Image: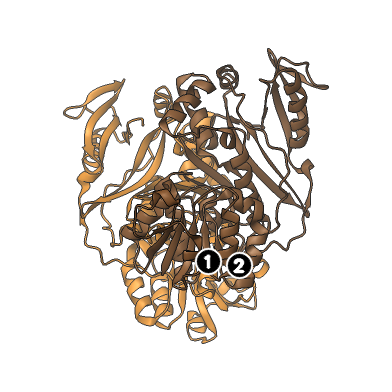
Chain colours: A orange, B brown
Amino acid sequence: MKIALLGHGVVGRGVDQIVSTCTQGMEVSRILELPDRLSDPRMTSSFDDIVNDPAIEAVVECMGGIEPAHTFIMAALAAGKSVVTSNKAVVAAHFEEFAQQAAASGASLLIEATCGGGIPWIASIQKALRIDEVTRISGIMNGTTNYLVDTMAKTGEDFSAVLARAQVLGYAERNPSDDVDGVDVKNKTIIAASVAFRTCCVREFPVMGIRNLTKADMRLFAGRDRVVKLLGRAVQRDGRYAVSVEPVALPMRSLEANVPSNFNLVTLEGATVGELKFYGQGAGSLPTGNAMVQDLLDLRDGRRPAYDFSRQLDYDPSLLAGDYVLRTSAAAPAGAIPFARGAWVMRNRTAAEARSILDEALADDPTSLIALLPQED
Amino acid sequence: MKIALLGHGVVGRGVDQIVSTCTQGMEVSRILELPDRLSDPRMTSSFDDIVNDPAIEAVVECMGGIEPAHTFIMAALAAGKSVVTSNKAVVAAHFEEFAQQAAASGASLLIEATCGGGIPWIASIQKALRIDEVTRISGIMNGTTNYLVDTMAKTGEDFSAVLARAQVLGYAERNPSDDVDGVDVKNKTIIAASVAFRTCCVREFPVMGIRNLTKADMRLFAGRDRVVKLLGRAVQRDGRYAVSVEPVALPMRSLEANVPSNFNLVTLEGATVGELKFYGQGAGSLPTGNAMVQDLLDLRDGRRPAYDFSRQLDYDPSLLAGDYVLRTSAAAPAGAIPFARGAWVMRNRTAAEARSILDEALADDPTSLIALLPQED
């Protein structure tokens, strides 16, 4: 099977390495690169060389970003070439359009690498769906923020100091907004929830990041035997669903609280299988490359996933509600109960209400932080 | 697809329920039961009624024990019927024989439910093997002992008190030896390691249980920020492998230390995918039934796993070595370093050496306990 790579960055090189050393009957025959980086005879800067090559069966997109990734994926699918992608932004934005084009062309769309790096997460959701309704997905889906929080907890340093070092080491982007403001988790949660709930999830729901998490916050929660992590969450029941991305003050003895470094831990729940959790490297050249090559092997072996988004579910933010802690120097919100100096608990609010409470507080104190405070089991 | 169940206990009823409510194109048409329990028109007490029925494509064995399960599985495979089983004892004892008969008859042997209940564990190992060598498997594979230790840690009670209550509640067998002495974990480790390492693992290797774990031991290790759990472990490298089952004093901040109740957590390691962990219900009617119905769905969809045991690996116990803590009133072993009153550390011993040290101590003090003391990351 001849493959073309779109992009030869960290992930593309991982795919290239794994295909050449670990698989048989598969070959990376073309690589799309920028005109000034054509360092390999397989490289071209013209997408036409790839999409018009009838020998190429699958296109592996690991460029990132919306355009030109969106155009290239649509063109490849329309040409009957299957697409394997690690690009969560473009899939979250165009999942239904891609799935329809794939179905219309008899090509396949494979997205394991968009969520959870090397974790077989999308495949596990699809496997669970063979028997169960999946009623909940949640988890730590961003390795960078888990690394930041884990390091803060271990060294007692402040967010900005740990972030600066992570940027120097290449663990965090120069512009960290996608990670620390929850955009990356938002995209992954949209994708995983859309697969799990068999509906194209809405793109607007409460997203709260951890940019304002301080070492004082970490100490405050550690004193209550908790640690704050950034979680994506989605639930469905009775024809309705809700999605959120938010900091969660997890009990120290939970599995999530103990996820180290840049690892991910994702959860699904089904009626007969119960709760399943999957842990692994959420990013990186070889783990993400592994997920993409697993998709290629599924293609080669005729295991072609299809996406069913026909389910009618109403978006209902009231399904995700709980107690929240707001740390701010702004005035306490109505109904707030003192939690600590400069911090309040608000009982039984939805994530959408929490987002509004946070926005009001941020107007007065731009360092304000809000976190869900789940009850101990 | 017509299916016959061998046994209609906890697991058999789970399979029956899931097949009738969650799957299409599948039917439990016969059930083997004892002559005095034929309460359903599908039931028969004659295996011949099943093995001679050409309409039955798959036999689901959930009787447990070695005989007659072994004879029935071989007869079903020889008759060209695929076998789905949750019986770890019989698969651990006869894995190669079953796999050879399946290959010879063109039938399939599916064993997901033998290890880790509802966790897609065997399938995940086989998926990882498409790309990577699996160099290590390990984990909490027995829900009963995890429940016992977790309850001891939470209530401060002694082993015998918690075990007695678990027996009343049906969480532990009246004869708890299979669970607390490590026999169940041994069988699961043999099966998972044989799949992972592509060799039929030896049946004799060091197995140490947690029968002698006391509340004083729990306190001793809690004071060092550790908790003792029963783990199965297997590693391979450079053409050699080793296997063990033993109590491990895990750092409190590890994922394994925080596995609650009767859940399982299993780990595999591959060169490109890194470390993957899988968590879920390790037993129970519906989770184990779910795993067996997943196997049936694979059968229906033509996904038929094959087992490759052709790899030549030498068994070398020296691959699993570390520091051990022995708690005993017997004399300290040679080279032991004081750890606490009545407890010693022995540096860098193999699991086989630890088993010998424990046996010597048990001769003088039958309450002695040994546990691996892994270094903190």
Q: Can you name the residue that lies furthest to the top here?
A: B341
Could one spot residue B255 in this view of the protein?
Answer: yes
Q: Quadrant of residue B230?
A: top right
Cβ atoms under marks 1 and 2 closer than 8 Å: yes
The residue sitting at 49% across, 62% down in the picture is: B59
Which residue reaches farthest left?
A334
In which quadrant is the N terminus of chain A drawn?
Answer: bottom right
Residue A34, percent from left and from top: 53, 72
| In this rendering, position of residue A280 left or right of residue A234 | right
Along the line of sight, which residue is nearer the eye, B12 or A192?
B12
> Residue A182 location, x and y as percent?
37, 48
- Looking at marks 1 and 2 on the same chain, the residue that comes earlier in the sequence is marked by 1
- Mark 2 lies on residue: B102
Residue marked by disc 1: B82
What amino acid is labelled 2 in the image? Answer: Ala
Residue visible at 71% across and 47% down? Answer: B203
Picture layout, residue B227 above or below residue B36: above
Callout 1: helix, strand or loop? strand
**Chain letter for mark 1:** B
Asked if residue B205 lies left or right of residue A10, the reply is: right
Q: Which mark is residue A30?
A: none
Label 2 packing within 10 angstroms: few (<14), some (14-19), many (20+): many
In this rendering, would B181 be left or right of A331? right
Determine the chain carrying the residue at label 2. B
Tell me the element at label 2: helix
* Residue type for callout 1: Ser
Question: From where the camera sits, is residue A113 visible?
Answer: no
> The C terminus of chain A is located in which quarter?
top left
- Mark 1 surroundings: few (<14), some (14-19) or many (≥20) residues within 10 A: many
Quadrant of res B223? top right
Q: Pick whichever, A26 or A351, lies toward us.
A: A26
> Which percent across, then down, holds residue B40?
34, 55
